Image: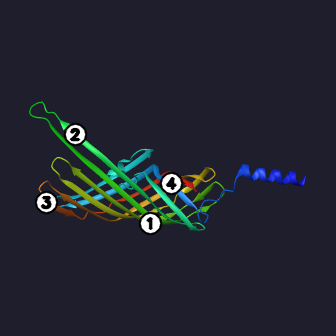
Amino acid sequence: MKHLGLGFLAASVLVSGPALADPGEAGQLALGAERLMGFSHSRHSSESEFGEQSSTYNNLTLLANPMAGFVTAYSIPRVALDYFPTQGVSIGGAISYTRVGISSKLEPNMGESTESSGTLSMFIFSPRVGYAAMFSESVGIWPRAGITYLKSSTSDDDDESKSEGSAVALSIEAPLLFMPVDNVAITLGPTIDYGLSASGEDTDSEGNTTEDDDNPAHEFGVQGGIVVFL
């Protein structure tokens, strides 16, 4: 009977496998897809010799590319990797890259037709630190803070003109963790991307360059995603 009992115990361990660690335990990795859905409010203002102009955008998205990407780009979906060196404390970051090819053709009723093409590219890198804590086996919170760096460029392939811009923002987010299954969490929580600096440079077809120190844009919202704890 003793050997029979040990056999049942060994079979149980093989079937069930090792116990799964709670999110945030030391040595864990977290792989996530972030800002896949949610609401964002962004604002941008600029000044020129003609006056001051401000733009405000409110966006509600579900697995879609938000229009806010054309204003601040902070809501564009991204891939994230975080590591927990000690209990609860995480270090890591998120990254995103977008490239869009644009082409157009104009065929007027009179005159010759014209064609134009260009590209738009955008890169986002957001290093951060955070702290994860579980309220129960299925609900927790994971506040994080860091810096988001954004680099964008546009070019016109026909006349070889181009524009480049960069921005830096203080990013703070506090997603709740909802775990429908072990080691997989749906995230949802507030996000703040407060612009610290922004600059741009335009080059025309003749090689003339002008620089612009723009007012940084700010974005606030509620964003959701998914994360797997490894």
Name the amino acid type tagged 4. Gly
On the rendered structure, is 120 left or right of 25? left
Q: Position of residue 219 (x, y in %)?
A: 39, 57
Element carrying mark 2: strand
User: Farthest residue toward the right?
Assistant: 1
For label 1, the crowd category at 10 Å Cα-Cα, with few meaning under 14, some 14 to 19 and many 20 or more, is some
Q: Residue at x 38, y 47 (%)?
A: 66
Disc 3 versus disc 1: nearer the observer: 3
Tell me which label, 2 or 3, sits earlier in the chain. 2
User: Farthest residue toward the bottom?
Assistant: 86
Tell me which label, 4 or 2, sits earlier in the chain. 4
Tell me which label, 3 or 4, sits earlier in the chain. 4
Label 4 to label 1: alpha-carbon separation: 17 Å
Label 4 to label 2: alpha-carbon separation: 36 Å
Q: Residue at x 82, y 50 (%)?
A: 8
Tell me which label, 4 or 1, sits earlier in the chain. 4
Name the amino acid type tagged 3. Asn
Tell me which label, 3 or 1, sits earlier in the chain. 1
Element carrying mark 1: strand
Q: Which numbered disc covers residue 104?
A: 2
Q: Is residue 133 above or below residue 73?
A: below
Label 2 to label 1: alpha-carbon separation: 39 Å
Disc 4 versus disc 1: nearer the observer: 4
Residue 102 image-quadrant placement: top left
Element carrying mark 3: loop
On the rendered structure, is 135 left or right of 51? right
Residue bearing the label numbered 4: 32
Residue bearing the label numbered 3: 208
Q: Which numbered disc covers residue 146?
A: 1
Name the amino acid type tagged 1. Gly
